[in-house]
Image (cartoon, rainbow, N blue to C red):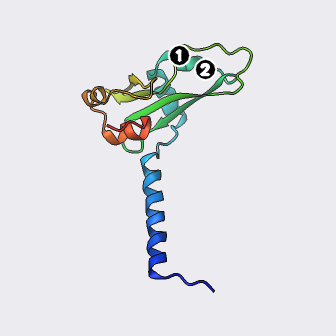
Amino acid sequence: MWQAGRGSLALVATIVLAGGLAGATLAARPPSPSERRAILAGAEPVFARVTAACGRTVVRVSTVDSAYASVSVRWRKPAGKTCKILPFSGTDLVARRAGRWQFLVNDASGSVRCDYLKRQRVPRAVSRELLGARC
């Protein structure tokens, strides 16, 4: 019969703690239906034109600060015959300011400028959670 020693318990505790922290950094949540509508109204209009045959619009709300959300598209492969290539890619970052969701930036290249996020007062943990930015 196997018995856990002190070193084994420390290893298990480290793995559990590390797994919990890794999950916490990417723990954005799905929006409620009313949040989703409001967030999409603040994102770039092209996201509203994505049809189910082409892909799925993904909206995530930050758990670090719920005044921030991201909008992106998970494209179908292969796409439906009626799909048109849309002139964008990447992820929109939107913020709720003055009671409305407003577009801040599109991270099309995957390398959004950290100085811009800082000027927009986006918390570092939010940019990391929603965009994967290392600012």
Q: Residue 128's spot in the image, x, y percent?
A: 39, 40
Left or right of 63: which side holds 50? right
Query: Among all residues in the image, which is located at the extreme left?
Result: 119
Q: Do the residues labelled 2 and 1 touch (CB within 8 Å)?
A: yes
Q: Residue 42's spot in the image, x, y percent?
A: 44, 22
Label drawn at residue 46: 1
Question: Disc 2 and disc 1: Cα gap in Å?
Answer: 7 Å
Question: What kind of element bears circle 1?
Answer: helix
**Of the residues shown, which amino acid type is indicated by label 1?**
Val
- Residue plotted at (52% across, 28% down): 72
Q: Residue 87's spot in the image, x, y percent?
A: 54, 13
Mark 1, Cα crowd under 10 Å, few <14 / some 14-19 / many 20+, is few
Quarter location, residue 115: top left
- Residue plotted at (49% across, 36% down): 60
- Residue plotted at (52% across, 21% down): 89
Count of numbered badges drawn on the protein: 2
Confirm whether residue 70 shows in the render.
yes
- Residue plotted at (63% across, 86% down): 1
Which residue is under mark 2? 50
